[in-house]
Image: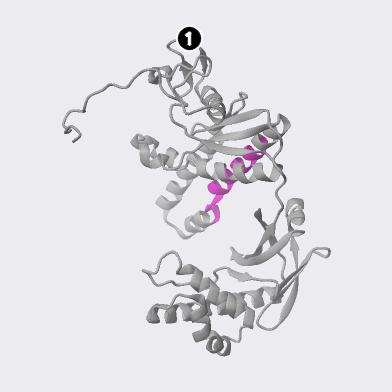
């Protein structure tokens, strides 16, 4: 498994200037390579290397390996789409490999190549990142963000063998509640929604003011909501995985791919729905489950909100509201999201749910019969 360890560099003022010059020179080289690739319609890394390697080295004074990384960056940028010319920002991230970057984890320093020569720069990180860096393997991205320097190091972690499980912990994701587990635990999304509304009001007021101080304030608060939401998803995923590990269960999740295209929301709820980061939570659950040796699966979400977890009766009328579930057959009352989570757990073991109430036959008004 590949994980990323983010560490913050602590360069001196002189080292800061050298790193900045190196980044600017490397991205200028990327733009030169991109100009040639677009003009000649050559996007293969090997072909670009053969045509430009020596000239880029002579013009930019970059080391051989950094020129190779610049060629790779341009070639990768054109892999997804060759219909538009690529332009690279002055301070865009540049990849370093083991030939031009070395970690000294015992001293918490890195030896990194810059235009004037090698620089030894101390770094700071948390305990989790220090542990990850013991398994560092591959490239590291040098990132300049808001006046600070970071290295994003790729680390190869060996996945443990999945544990023996006694069942599945179903997890229902939603907008009102970030996640609801089949054991009854509810992870509310109230904090996320309150924070979203607060930042929305703040942005609206600052944009209306339209002064230099308000623009600085807007820039300072940029990204705070997404970082808060990311932290909530991380903490929620970690708690769910630890619960599954402790109870010897796997984690079963709904496959919500394409849900934004399949469903509609009221106009006043669009911002709230657009802020729903269900995919991010799903990714965190998947990789954390693999890291802890917990089995993970995704199931078909069809009818999971309509089926009674007690008697199995499936009908749309069972779901009274967002939070209320009342079975029309057996009278079972439950929190709707907990009932759905229990159904997800059931589907992970059994076949997809088939509704008890047959659909109305016949064609809709205004449609033609099938030929």
The residue segment tinted magenta is: 220-239
Q: Name the residue under label 1.
A: 331
Give the residue at x 45% y 77%. 34
Q: Quadrant of residue 92?
A: bottom right
- The x and y percentages for residue 322 are 45, 24
Task: Report the predominant secondary structure element of the magenta stretch.
Answer: helix
Q: Is residue 228 magenta?
A: yes
Q: In which quarter of the image is residue 250?
A: top right
Mark 1: few/some/many CA within 10 Å (<14, 14-19, 20+): few
Give the residue at x 58% y 87%. 57
Closest to the observer, 14 or 323: 323
**Quarter that holds the C terminus:** top left
- The x and y percentages for residue 344 are 53, 29
Does 231 appear above or below 113?
A: above
Q: What element carries label 1?
A: loop
Closest to the observer, 218 or 250: 250
63 horizontally vs 325: left or right: right
Q: Does the magenta stretch include residue 150?
A: no
Which residue occupies the extreme front position in the image?
A: 371
Q: Is residue 57 visible?
A: yes
- The x and y percentages for residue 82 are 39, 69
């Amino acid at each position: 498994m590949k994980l990323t360890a983010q560490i913050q560099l602590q360069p001196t003022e002189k080292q800061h200037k050298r790193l900045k010059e190196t980044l600017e020179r490397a991205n200028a080289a990327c733009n030169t390579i991109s100009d040639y690739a677009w003009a000649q319609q050559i996007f293969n890394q090997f072909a670009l290397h053969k045509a430009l390697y020596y000239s880029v080295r002579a013009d930019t004074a970059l080391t051989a390996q950094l020129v190779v990384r610049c060629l790779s960056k341009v070639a990768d940028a054109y892999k997804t789409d060759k219909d538009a010319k690529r332009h690279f920002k002055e301070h865009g991230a540049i990849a370093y490999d083991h030939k031009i970057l070395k970690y000294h984890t015992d001293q918490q320093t890195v030896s990194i190549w810059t235009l004037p020569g090698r620089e030894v720069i101390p770094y700071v990180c948390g305990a989790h990142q220090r542990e990850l860096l013991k398994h560092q393997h591959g490239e590291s991205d040098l990132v300049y963000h808001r006046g600070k320097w970071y290295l994003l190091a790729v680390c190869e972690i060996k996945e443990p063998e999945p544990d023996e499980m006694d069942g599945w912990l179903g997890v229902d994701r939603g907008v009102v509640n970030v996640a609801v587990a089949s054991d009854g635990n509810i992870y509310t999304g109230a904090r996320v929604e309150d924070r979203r509304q607060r930042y929305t009001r703040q942005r609206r007021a600052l944009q209306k003011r339209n002064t230099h101080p308000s623009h600085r304030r807007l820039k300072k608060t940029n990204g705070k909501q997404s970082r808060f939401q990311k932290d909530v998803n991380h903490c929620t995923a970690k708690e769910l995985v630890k619960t599954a590990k402790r109870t010897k269960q796997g984690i079963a999740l709904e496959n919500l791919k394409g849900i934004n295209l399949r469903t509609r929301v009221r106009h006043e709820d669009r911002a709230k729905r657009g802020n729903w980061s269900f995919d991010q939570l799903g990714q965190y659950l998947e990789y954390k489950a693999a890291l802890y040796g917990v089995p993970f699966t995704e199931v078909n979400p069809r009818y999971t909100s309509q089926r009674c977890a007690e008697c199995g009766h499936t009908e749309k009328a069972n779901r009274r509201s967002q939070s209320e579930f009342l079975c029309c057959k057996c009278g079972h009352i439950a929190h709707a999201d907990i009932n759905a989570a229990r159904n997800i757990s059931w589907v992970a073991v059994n076949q997809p749910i088939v509704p008890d109430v047959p659909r109305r036959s016949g064609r809709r008004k205004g449609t033609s019969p099938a030929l």
